[in-house]
């Protein structure tokens, strides 16, 4: 199980307009906070969520980099993100972690788009 912020449908649709998917499979659904948590884990309490950048592998993986309450690092040290689109023959959603791990080489800063998402515990 994992805690996450799930994009509202309105936010998802607006972001799809701003950041057109580049690859066949559109994921665009949530921002992971903590992975591998037990049932009953308290939900995250971020109030201010923004898309702050975009990453593209140029060969099949696209992700949006996100900040939560001004921080772009999750509790586990990885970067908050939304796996946006991918080529399922080459990538899985989890591969976004590696794509965005190194800011200097993999993603570019964006304008900072505030988004709505709901805290959830997912399987």
Image (spheres, helix red, strand yellow):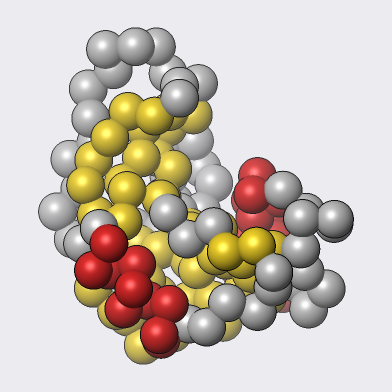
Residue extending furthest toward the top? 39
Task: State how many labels appear.
Answer: 0
Residue at 31% in and 56% down: 7
Residue 113 image position (x, y, % from top left) = 29, 79
Quadrant of the rendering where the N terminus is positioned: top left
Q: Residue at x 31, y 46 (%)?
A: 5
Please determine whether, in this image, residue 114 is positioned above or below residue 39: below
Between residue 122 and residue 38, name the one nearer to us.
122
Q: Is residue 67 left or right of residue 78?
A: left
Above or below residue 52? Residue 28 is above
**Which quadrant holds residue 17?**
bottom left
Left or right position of 91 against 3: right
Q: Where is residue 33? Give x, y as percent.
A: 39, 40
Q: Is residue 111 left or right of residue 64?
A: left
Q: Is residue 55 visible?
A: yes
The image position of residue 79, as x and y in percent, is 51, 53
The percent position of residue 46, horizontal first and vertical second, equals 20, 48
Name above or below for residue 70 compared with residue 58.
above
**Residue 102 shows in this picture:** no
89 is higher (above) or lower (below) than 51: above
Q: Residue at x 47, y 60 (%)?
A: 28
Q: Quadrant of the C terminus?
A: top left
Report the residue at 65% width, 45% height from top.
94
């Amino acid at each position: 199980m994992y805690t996450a912020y799930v994009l509202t449908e309105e936010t998802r649709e607006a972001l799809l307009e701003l950041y057109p998917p580049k690859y066949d499979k559109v994921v665009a659904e949530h921002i992971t906070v903590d992975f591998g948590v037990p049932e009953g884990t308290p939900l995250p309490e971020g109030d201010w969520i923004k898309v702050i950048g975009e990453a593209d592998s140029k060969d099949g993986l696209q992700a949006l980099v996100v900040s939560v309450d001004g921080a772009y690092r999750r509790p586990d040290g990885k970067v908050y993100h939304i796996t946006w689109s991918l080529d399922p023959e080459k990538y899985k959603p989890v591969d976004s972690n590696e794509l965005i791990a190194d800011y200097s080489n993999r993603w570019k800063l964006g304008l900072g788009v505030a988004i709505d998402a709901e805290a959830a515990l997912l399987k």
